[in-house]
Image (cartoon, helix red, strand yellow):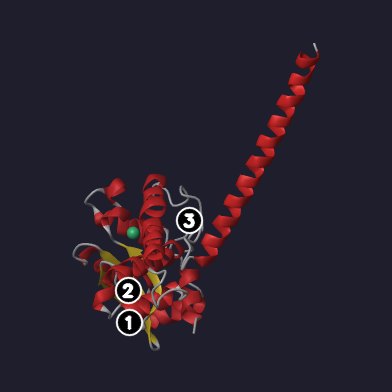
């Protein structure tokens, strides 16, 4: 009878040990995770909106793969390559600028630049985009292109004519603005330029939603998602 009476006590102690041990393990894992994050060269920035926020132009399915798989892979690859190299501890932006002309660092450049480009791309889009840019940016657009529609036309031409994978950019060029396109991982930033907005035209950005109709994706982005406030912020950046 005593034994039976003791059983629950033993079980309770076991449970306590297990719970305490589990908590310790969890705390240790958390600490290791924190250290690993602190040592990592870069982190995956959170999406600035929900994965379904850009529908119907960009589906949650596309955004989920694009952010959780593609963007994350670029960040993870940088963090695998960088430790123990002279690039450890540098910002992502500096890694991009320092590796663009280093032929033996092409893998690091490609992954770092893609990580930077994607973080910039998410912020170039907004689920509740305003139709009109802020006044100062609007004035630059008028001076450089004539009007917003003319700028959009140039962006559409750059985005649809880019052969294969790449990006279409709005860039500050001295007092004026210009549109340009880059291939694969390349960017104006890598070459000392000042990007204001970007559209990803890699097939992974649109193929699930539009298949081969890149122009439909590009026009949807231009009509409904361009984040003019972000472009205006970049214009004032030193
Ligand atoms: Fe992409």
Label 1 within 8 A of ligand 1 by Cβ: no
Label 2 within 8 A of ligand 1 by Cβ: no
Q: Is residue 104 found left or right of 111 in the rendered image?
A: left
Q: Assess disc 1: are there few (<14), some (14-19) or many (≥20) residues with their C-alpha within 10 Å of its C-alpha.
A: few
Examine the image and state in which quarter residue 93 appears: bottom left
Residue at horizontal 69%, vertical 40%?
Answer: 20
Q: Is residue 12 found left or right of 154 in the rendered image?
A: right
The local secondary structure at tag 1 comes to helix
User: Which numbered tag is attached to residue 155?
Assistant: none
Residue at horizontal 27%, vertical 81%?
Answer: 101
Q: Quadrant of the N terminus?
A: top right
Residue at horizontal 40%, vertical 88%?
Answer: 175
User: Which numbered tag is attached to residue 187?
Assistant: 2
- Does the image show residue 168? no
Q: Are marks 2 and 1 in contact (CB under 8 Å)?
A: yes
Q: What residue is disc 3 on?
A: 127
The answer for how far apart the CA atoms under marks 2 and 1 are is 7 Å
The answer for how far apart the CA atoms under marks 3 and 2 are is 24 Å
Q: What residue is disc 1 on?
A: 191
- Of 117 and 177, the residue lying toward us: 117
The local secondary structure at tag 2 comes to loop
Q: Counting residues from the N terminus, which is met first, the one under dot 3 or under dot 2?
A: 3
Q: Are marks 1 and 3 in contact (CB under 8 Å)?
A: no
Marks counted in the figure total 3
Up-down relation of residue 224 to residue 65 (above or below): below
Spot occupied by residue 142 in the image (x, y as percentages of width and height): 39, 79
- Does the image show residue 163? yes
Q: Assess disc 3: are there few (<14), some (14-19) or many (≥20) residues with their C-alpha within 10 Å of its C-alpha.
A: some
């Amino acid at each position: 009878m005593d034994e039976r009476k003791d059983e629950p006590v033993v079980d309770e102690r076991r449970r306590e040990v297990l719970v305490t041990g589990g908590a310790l393990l969890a705390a240790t894992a958390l600490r290791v995770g924190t250290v690993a994050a602190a040592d990592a060269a870069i982190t995956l920035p959170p999406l600035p909106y929900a994965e379904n926020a850009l529908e119907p132009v960009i589906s949650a399915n596309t955004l989920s793969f694009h952010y959780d798989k593609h963007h994350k892979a670029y960040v993870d690859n940088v963090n695998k390559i960088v430790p123990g190299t002279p690039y450890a501890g540098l910002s992502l932006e500096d890694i991009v600028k320092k590796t663009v002309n280093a032929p033996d660092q092409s893998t690091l450049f490609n992954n770092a630049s893609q990580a930077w480009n994607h973080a910039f791309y998410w912020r170039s889009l907004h689920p509740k985009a305003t139709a009109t840019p802020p006044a100062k940016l609007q004035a630059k657009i008028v001076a450089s292109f004539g009007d917003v529609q003319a700028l959009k036309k140039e962006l559409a031409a750059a985005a649809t004519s880019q052969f294969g994978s790449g990006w279409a950019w709005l860039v500050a060029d001295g007092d004026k603005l210009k549109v340009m396109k880059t291939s694969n991982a390349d960017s104006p930033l890598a070459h000392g330029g000042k990007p204001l907005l970007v559209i990803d035209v890699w097939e992974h950005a649109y193929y699930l939603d539009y298949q081969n109709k890149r122009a439909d994706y590009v026009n949807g982005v231009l009509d409904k998602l361009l984040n003019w406030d972000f472009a205006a912020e970049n214009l004032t950046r030193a």
